[in-house]
Structure formats: C-alpha cells, structure tokens
Image (cartoon, rainbow, N blue to C red):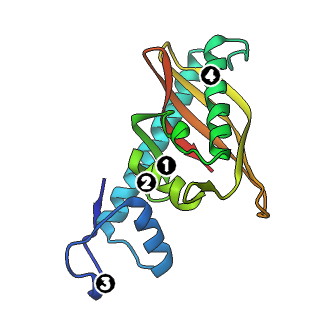
Amino acid sequence: MPLILTRRPKHLRKELKVDWVDLVDYVYKTKIKLSPMTYITTKVKSIFLAAAFALCLLIANKAGAQTAPASDPRVKEMTNAMNRSADEWNKGHLEPLMNLYDPSATMSMPTGLVGLDGIRTVYEKYYFVGKTPKQNLRYNDIKVRFLGRDYALLTGGFTLYGNNLPERSGRYSLVMIRKGKTWKILHDHSG
C-alpha cells in the first residue's frame, strides 16, 4: 500500500506516493524526519503487529502448544516446502519461495508491514542481481508449533553464504495458514 507523505522537502512538493521499501531507503539516505502523523501511523502498525504476534505466542502457550515432532506429516510438508524453495533460490528461481506466501501475506519491515509486492521487491532488490541470487540460502533448526487446526508458528534459522561475500545468518518466525491442503506464509518476520 503506498504511503502519501504529508510533509515534504521543497524539492518534493507535488504529491508523492512511495512504496514502503522505497520509503525506508529514502529515509535512511536523506535522514529526513517523518511527519508526526506518518511516524505515529507507522508506530501504531508496528505495535499492533507486535501485540498480534505476542497474542499468538500467548495463545500457543495457554493452549499447551508444543513444538510438533519432525515426523508429523504437516511439519514434513512445511519443512520440505521451505527446503525446496531454498534449493530453487540457489538456482536463481525466486518464484517457488514467493509461491509459499499467501496472497494476503505481510512482512515486518522497519517502517511497518509490506504486502506481497513489497516482499517480492525486498527479495529482488536486496538478495538478487537479475535472476542470480547474491548468495546461496539454507534453512536450519526448523520448528513448528500448531496454533489450532489451520494455523502454525514456524521458526528457524537461515544462512546466506557464498559468492565471496561474508556469511550472514539470522532467525525467522513465520505465521502459517492452511489453505486447502497447502500451508502458506501469512506473516514473515525475519532478521
């Protein structure tokens, strides 16, 4: 969803619609301060997301949700899909990873949430050069907690490696939703 800036520098006086990813770049590069309303809106979205995530964890804890065994067919399905997407990523195919996302999926960014187009833009802009990944990808330590019949929390680690670049590792939390017989990513928080 584009953001319309309410206070702009003189060189940007006409109406300006900015994609969230572009806004992050712009803010960091120019060191501008966001208008109070934009700042508040961004903070409210971030607080709402954090509260929703905390609520998922609380519900999982209260419901006695435990990490499901790796032998569970649903866990195998999610783990295999993640690993297949990493294998395809390493061949230069982003689409299998994008196909794991639900059409209504969101991703947490420093400025707030982005939708599916923003997620694709992040991957293409920061992790690929054309059709070639800047580094190879692998997942590890995948764990799944079921949050009811049609929802799950998938957590784990990722490593970006190769191409004479420093190895980078991080953790991720994915809220998964079952759509028919397939599990899709509903929300992605990676860092």
Mark 2 to mark 4 CA distance (whole Å): 25 Å
The residue to which callout 1 is attached is: 108
The residue to which callout 2 is attached is: 112
Please tell me which of labels 3 and 2 falls first in the chain: 3
Numbered disc 1: secondary structure: strand
Q: Do the numbered discs 1 and 4 sit on residues whose CB atoms are within 8 Å?
A: no
- Amino acid tagged 2: Gly
Q: Is residue 103 left or right of residue 60?
A: left
- Amino acid tagged 4: Arg
Numbered disc 3: secondary structure: loop
The residue to which callout 3 is attached is: 9
Please tell me which of labels 3 and 4 falls first in the chain: 3
Numbered disc 4: secondary structure: strand
The residue to which callout 4 is attached is: 145
- Is 18 situated above or below 156? below
- Amino acid tagged 3: Pro
Which residue is at 55% across, 27% downward?
A: 58
Which residue is at 27% across, 76% downward?
A: 7
Label 2 Cα neighbours within 10 Å, binned few <14 / some 14-19 / many ≥20: many
Label 4 Cα neighbours within 10 Å, binned few <14 / some 14-19 / many ≥20: many
Q: Where is residue 103 shown, x and y percent of the image?
A: 38, 35
Asked whether 185 or 173 is in front, the reply is: 185
